[in-house]
Amino acid sequence: MKNSEYMRLRREFICDVTRLLYDPGSHTRSKMWIWRNFILPVLGIGYQTYLKESKADVAFDPDRMSRLVAAFELLTERGHQALGRTAARPRVSGTAETEGPMPCTREEVEA
């Protein structure tokens, strides 16, 4: 793969992810959040590079966008499965849960 083709694919990926996830009015869906959670782990580029390439004029391709949405849905499903496995582990008795109500007064604690 030539360098120019890689750069084009990278720019398309950045623009598509930004189009899909960016919400101008929300701090939880800012470009910094997108970069930190999706761009940096995958591409390993800096924030300024991401900002520069996210402003590139890339044509909207519905097929490419649908593949990206399908990939995000697959990752989300795998994440839910992983969280389900860790949440289903049995708790060790006496570590995270107390038996009965918590004592409120000094007499109750000393008893």
Image (spheres, rainbow, N blue to C red):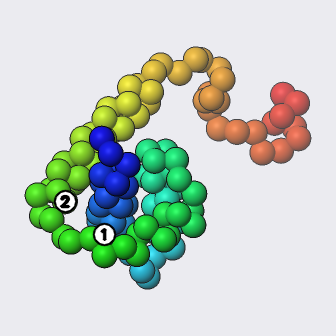
Picture coordinates of residue 22, whole percent (x, y): 38, 70
Q: Is residue 37 above or below residue 97?
A: below
Q: Is residue 96 above or below residue 40?
A: above
* Quarter of the image with the N terminus in it: top left
Decide which of 54, 80 is in the foreground and name it: 54
Q: Secondary structure at mark 1?
A: helix
Picture coordinates of residue 80, whole percent (x, y): 33, 38
Label for residue 31?
none
Q: Is residue 25 above or below residue 8?
A: below
- Label 2 packing within 10 angstroms: few (<14), some (14-19), many (20+): some
Tell me which residue sits at (15%, 65%) in the image.
61
Decide which of 99, 78 is in the foreground and name it: 78
Residue to which mark 2 is pinned: 65
Give the amino acid type for the residue marked by disc 1 in the picture.
Arg
Tell me which residue sits at (36%, 73%) in the image.
56
User: Does residue 73 appear in this view?
Assistant: no
Tell me which residue sits at (43%, 52%) in the image.
38
Disc 1 vs disc 2: Cβ atoms closer than 8 Å? yes
Residue to which mark 1 is pinned: 19
